[in-house]
Image (cartoon, rainbow, N blue to C red):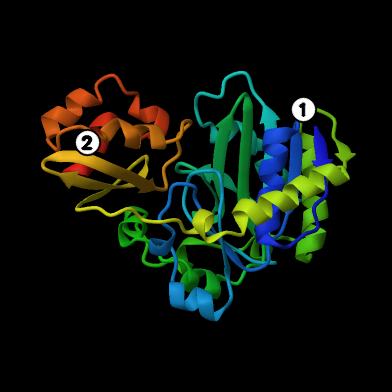
Amino acid sequence: MKFIENTSTNPYYNLAFEEYIFKNLKEDVVLLWRNAPAIIVGKHQNTVEEINTDYVKEKDIKIVRRITGGGAVYHDLGNLNFSFITNAENTSEIDFKTHNIPILNALKQLGVNCELSGRNDMVIEGKKFSGIAQSVAKGRVLNHGTILFDSDLGVLSQALKVKQDKIESKGIKSVASRVTNIREHLTEDVDVLEFKEVLLKNIFRFLEKPVTRHELSEADKEAVDAMVKDRYNTWEWNYGQSPKFNVKGYQRFPGGGIEVRLLVKDGIISDSKIYGDFFGARDPKELEEALVGLKYDQEAITEGLNAVRVEDYLGKITREEFIFCIFN
């Protein structure tokens, strides 16, 4: 296992840095990093519907899309982010538990009584302090998440535009009441950089493989800079065009929220787009393409998707739930 130090707080650079390591290095890697104020949206989300646009512009909060599924999260300098990038023989399914045990064990050593909850959260006394997301590709797994250490929860609650059905599904009234900062639960007070070093030491203790420090070459760093310029700091990547549509369905299921937008002409689907905070092992673009050309009819779509493993694209959302969403 390699530890690569990254002291940048530029969210565009940091997301590119992480993806470059995920897709180009062969070793297992652990990262701990921080961003200046930013909202990091999930790969499959419709950005404008996840953020409070006027507030974000007023506060100069950066918007960056990541390559993993799940929901939008707020980062600031009081927030610590972790990334575990590992090789794995079976990458057909998303598995949150396996890759987050070192984080849980490290926090427990610091006196923090925490646990995994729901699909992809870590909580203290029922309050979320970490959201976790994953991507799998070519035998590699990227498992990353946030740790709210001393984040500005007031900004967080105003910057994110959380759908009411998501709040209600958790039986709570607001974003602010859902989350907590780690610092409030420590037995000995430290700042975020001290916390980073203590956490890193404890993570190393609970990893099965020995950890050595590693630095990127100048060629690697230039490649990361190119990714920032070509993708991560572009409107096309972070917002993207929302296609024209005349049919829209949205539902929240135990496996996540999903929105399907279709352009239907003369009863035939000519374009489609799938948004949501779901986690899948394959790109839902393939599922979108499978809808094109089908008659906009529940029986026709059911038959057309009969051979498609919808769960590969949408995680815990089933074929039946997906079709229900299209027509409701």
The amino acid beneath tag 1 is Glu
Q: Quadrant of the N terminus?
A: top right
Q: Which residue lies under the disc numbered 2? A: 323
**In this view of the protein, can residue 102 be seen by the observer?**
no
The residue under the point 30% across, 57% down is 165
Question: In front of the other: label 2 or label 1?
Answer: 2
Q: Which residue lies under the disc numbered 1? A: 208
The residue under the point 41% across, 63% down is 48
Between residue 66 and residue 87, name the one nearer to us. 66
Q: Are marks 2 and 1 in contact (CB under 8 Å)?
A: no
**Number of numbered callouts drawn:** 2
Give the left or right position of residue 116, taking residue 221 as reference: left
Say which element carries label 2: helix
Q: Quadrant of residue 151?
A: bottom right
The spot of residue 181 in percent (x, y) is: 61, 63
The spot of residue 149 in percent (x, y) is: 67, 62
Give the left or right position of residue 307, taking residue 102 as reference: left
**In this view of the protein, can residue 72 be seen by the observer?**
yes
The spot of residue 250 in percent (x, y) is: 26, 50
**85 lies above or below 73:** above
Crowdedness near tag 2: few (<14), some (14–19) or many (≥20) residues, C-alpha within 10 Å: some
The amino acid beneath tag 2 is Ile
**290 lies above or below 10:** above
The spot of residue 247 in percent (x, y) is: 19, 50
Among numbered discs 2 and 1, the one appearing first in the sequence: 1
Give the left or right position of residue 62, taking residue 183 as reference: left
**Which circle marks residue 82 in the picture?**
none
The residue under the point 57% across, 78% down is 59
Crowdedness near tag 1: few (<14), some (14–19) or many (≥20) residues, C-alpha within 10 Å: few
Say which element carries label 1: loop
Between residue 234 and residue 154, name the one nearer to us. 234
